[in-house]
Amino acid sequence: MEYNVHTLKNGIRILHVPAASAISHACILVNAGSRDEEDAQMGLAHFIEHLIFKRTEKRTTSQILNRLESVGADLNAYTTKEYTCVHASFLHPYLDRTLELFNDIVFHSTFPEDEMEKEKGVVLDEISSYLDQPEEAINDDFEDILFRGHSFGRNILGTPETVSNLTRKNIQSFVKNKYRTDQIIVAVIGNYTLNKLVKIAEKYFADVPENTGSSNRTAPIVNPSIHQIVDKQIAQSHCMMGTQIYSLHHPYKTGLLLLNNLFGGNGMSSILNLQLREKYGIAYTVESAYSPLSDTGIFAIYFGTDKEKSEKAIHLIRKEMNKLKQKPLTEVQLHKAQSKFIGQIALGEENRIGLIIAMAKSLLDYNQIDSLETVFQKIRQVSVSDMNNIINDVFDESKWTSLLFNPVD
């Protein structure tokens, strides 16, 4: 897909993706997330994401929320371990309005004490809601075990104690030190010329003070394997098992994305779904996920099932892993997996808001954006030998950590 990048004098990059549509999508992506917090400030990045919608130097909460919704647009945001993202979908004429609002909430929020106290209550309710959902809570607890001692293991929401103790000074310091202008992308996909987008972006972002300090992120170490069982007052067993694995920049990243898609990724025809759900009727949900990060990655398998079936589910998962290790993929099997994955990616292009965010992330992570054909070429270039090396590496159970939530009466 065609794109252009324009860099402002302060380092903020403007990503322009032309598309002939009446609907436009935009995001502002900041390379700062929960991994950048101090130990005692867990949940800070996510808390800031909430507070930017509460009050700015010139707008009240109501004015912020109505600025785009009053013209039928959608405004939202999210926080991950490495990013903070504000995004919007809107009709073509409202580009100026959208980028002006992005500027206002990201760079001119005032973080008033009264709004902070109210929003702490909202976040505490959000934490409680997650704790009430074992399929959500187990993911956070698993990553805490996997990355114990490192900020990657932190719950993005924080804990009730850390959120309750966050101060306005914490917020201002985090924004000042972590919202670096050379690590911010403003991205737009829509029916605009590059000149028009740059003109509007210059109007709202050129005056943002330059802030290009260095990152102090440290890579996690690989911890010894741990296998934990936690008794809980829940109806079903929930299990996660997995390992640290390739980062965004590893040459086997594409191959592992392909393996994940084959083994337990999207669709009903994955190996795990066909075996555990369709053949044995054991689990309604069984899936694998590969999340590549800037200096590490996570490969993990999740399932939920009745307590008496959890041991069999684990046995079957291990059986399928060993099958792949003992009987290498054939060229025909690899070709089918590649075709399936390429087709899913092509269909994903229809999700334009997801597309523009993914392109902005690529620009942050790699300083470039691969065309769709380049992505497909990389998938096709994964060889049987590559796949077998990856299979033997990622399915080495001596490196795996597991967590089981066990129902108790």
Image: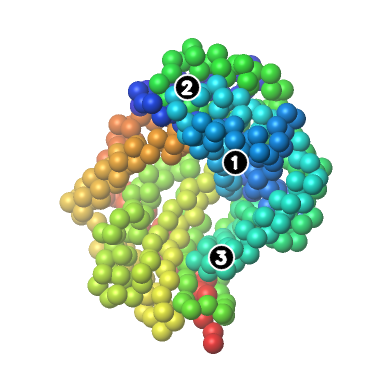
Q: Amino acid at mark 3?
A: Ala
Mark 2 crowdedness (10 Å alpha carbons): few <14, some 14-19, many ≥20: few
Q: Secondary structure at mark 3?
A: helix
Mark 3 crowdedness (10 Å alpha carbons): few <14, some 14-19, many ≥20: some
- Image-quadrant location for residue 70: top right
Mark identifier at residue 137 = 3
Q: Is residue 111 above or below residue 321?
A: above
Judging depth in this view, the residue of 111 and 304 nearest the camera is 111
Residue 393: x and y, percent?
Answer: 41, 57
Is tag 1's residue or tag 2's residue first in the polypeptide sequence? 1
**Residue at image coords 57%, 68%:** 132
**Residue at image coords 51%, 23%:** 95
Q: Secondary structure at mark 2?
A: helix
CB under 8 Å between callouts 2 and 3?
no
Quadrant where the N terminus sits is: top left
Q: Is residue 135 above or below residue 205?
A: below
The residue that mark 2 highlights is: 93
Q: Look at the image and name its color scheme.
A: rainbow
- 294 sits left or right of 394 in the view: right
**Residue at image coords 66%, 29%:** 104
**Residue at image coords 30%, 41%:** 347
Q: Is residue 304 visible?
A: yes
Q: Amino acid at mark 1?
A: Thr
Q: Amino acid at mark 2?
A: Pro
The residue that mark 1 highlights is: 84
Residue farthest bottom in this picture: 409
Judging depth in this view, the residue of 209 and 27 nearest the camera is 27
Residue 66: x and y, percent?
Answer: 59, 35
Measure the C-alpha gap from mark 1 to mark 2. Answer: 26 Å
